Image (spheres, rainbow, N blue to C red):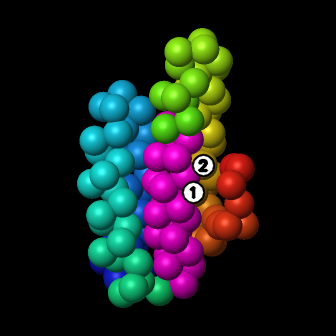
Amino acid sequence: MSATEDQQNIAKVIYILYLVSLVTGGVTAIVGVVLAYFYQDSSDEPMKDHFRFQIRTFWMALLYSFICGATIPVLIGFVFTVVLFIWMIARCVKGLNAIGRNEAPADITTWWF
């Protein structure tokens, strides 16, 4: 197995950890972001972009989670939480599809999908 294949497998595992975090309350996302930080500097392009994308996804999801939690008392937070779940799934699917094509995720700096 080549170094690129190893990095692709690690990136896939991180995306899966992010998806599982939707059921575990974010615990596996913490493991995923630690892995992304660890592999970011030693990886090749386009995998470096995947790790950056994953790190950004974690921090944006954390911010969005705080917004969801703060708006729960006015009930709109429940809608925001559903949107957050869809957002997280979409970003992970986008990343997994890009890995399958041996490409970096498109527009890794976006706050959307």
Q: Is residue 9 visible?
A: no
Q: Compare residues 90 and 80 and report the one nearer the observer.
A: 80
- Identity, as a three-letter code, of the amino acid under mark 2: Arg
Q: Main secondary structure of the magenta part?
A: helix
Please rate how many residues cluster around mark 1, counting C-alpha atoms within 10 Å: few if below 14, some from 14 to 19, many from 20.
many
- Residue 96 image offset from top left, x and y in percent: 54, 54
Q: Compare residues 60 and 73 and report the one nearer the observer.
A: 73
Residue 72 vertical placement versus 46 (above, below): above
Query: Which region is colored magenta?
Result: 45-65
- Identity, as a three-letter code, of the amino acid under mark 1: Gly
Please rate how many residues cluster around mark 2, counting C-alpha atoms within 10 Å: few if below 14, some from 14 to 19, many from 20.
many
Q: Which one is in front in this view, the residue at disc 1 or the one at disc 2?
A: 2
Say what secondary structure mark 1 lies in. helix
At horizontal 69% and vertical 50% (from top left) the residue drawn is: 113
Q: Is residue 7 left or right of residue 34?
A: right
**Membership of 56 in magenta stretch:** yes
At horizontal 41% and vertical 46% (from top left) the residue drawn is: 18
Q: For mark 1, what is the residue?
A: 95
Give the position of the N terminus as an image quadrant.
bottom left
